[in-house]
Image (cartoon, helix red, strand yellow):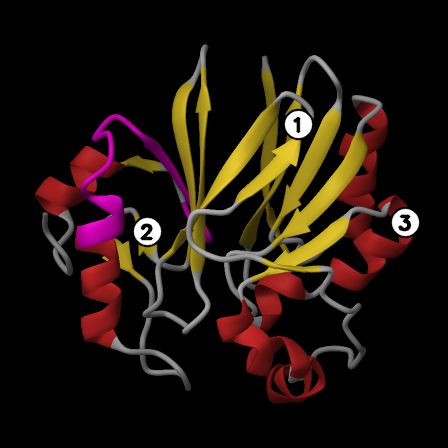
């Protein structure tokens, strides 16, 4: 059994997920963009052990509480090296949006396309999908009961895609990532985007006005 709680965190309503193996209670926190106390409440409710804190990319609204989650719960911090410039630029990002300045915790593991991040008897597969940022990734997991889940960050949304007008963004690269690395997967895969409602991969391939399969 897979345990999943997703909620919209912080001023930008980033979808933060606490995902856990129901058998072992080992957990992964995906994109802790805010509300450390809410993450802690979920961990406590299910008596979870956080094994990893993973990021779809390193924009501020997806990493804002990483340091606090690490301090409270432990777990290795995972990020694609392509987003090092954003992660190291945490203070500059915070100043840009008028958020409380702070520092990040060191990355424990640089993840790449094809890597796996384990949580008990389950694991997340890493899919590198550059375009929104150079180091953007998606995480995929298969659940016997719920089917396939894809945590897409800001690469793919319901009827939209990630913006590419920020430093490091590239629209052609984003479209290629979506077509070649996402739309080629099971169309029934449930997509949990970085913001907003869930969708299905097949629905986006057919109806997304920005990138079609």
Residue 20's disc number: 1
SS of the residue under disc 2: strand
Magenta residues (range) = 180-196
What's the CA distance linking mark 1 and mark 3?
Answer: 17 Å
**Residue 153 versus residue 107 in the image, above or below:** above
**Residue 143 versus residue 32 in the image, above or below:** above
Can residue 100 be found in the magenta stretch? no
Q: Is residue 205 left or right of residue 155?
A: left
- The percent position of residue 25, horizontal first and vertical second, equals 75, 22
Quarter of the figure with residue 136: bottom left
Q: Mark 2 packing: few (<14 Cα in 10 Å), some, or many (20+)?
A: many
Q: Is residue 49 left or right of residue 177?
A: right
Q: Are marks 2 and 3 in contact (CB under 8 Å)?
A: no
- The percent position of residue 66, horizontal first and vertical second, equals 74, 60
Which of the marked residues, 1 or 2, is nearer the chain's N terminus?
A: 1
Residue with the mark numbered 3: 72
Residue with the mark numbered 2: 157
What's the CA distance linking mark 1 and mark 2?
Answer: 23 Å
Q: Is residue 79 left or right of residue 36?
A: left
């Amino acid at each position: 059994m897979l345990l999943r709680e997703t909620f919209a965190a912080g001023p930008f309503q980033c979808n933060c997920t606490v995902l856990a193996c129901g058998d072992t209670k080992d957990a992964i926190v995906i994109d802790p963009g805010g509300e450390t106390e809410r993450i802690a409440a979920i961990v406590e409710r299910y008596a979870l052990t956080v094994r990893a804190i993973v990021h779809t990319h390193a924009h501020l609204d997806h990493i804002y509480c990483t340091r606090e989650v690490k301090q409270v719960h432990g777990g290795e911090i995972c990020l694609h090296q392509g987003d090092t410039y954003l992660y190291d630029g945490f203070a500059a990002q915070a100043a840009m949006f008028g958020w409380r300045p702070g520092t990040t915790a060191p990355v424990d593991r640089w993840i790449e396309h094809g890597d796996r991040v384990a949580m008990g008897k389950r694991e997340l597969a890493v899919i590198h999908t550059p375009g929104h940022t150079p180091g953007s990734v998606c995480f995929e997991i298969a659940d016997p009961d719920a089917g396939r889940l894809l945590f897409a960050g800001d690469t793919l949304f319901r009827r939209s895609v990630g913006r590419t007008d920020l430093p490091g963004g590239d629209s052609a690269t984003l479209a290629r990532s979506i077509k070649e690395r996402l739309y080629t997967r099971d169309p029934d895969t449930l997509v949990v985007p970085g913001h907003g409602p869930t969708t299905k991969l097949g629905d986006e391939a057919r109806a997304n006005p920005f990138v079609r399969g």
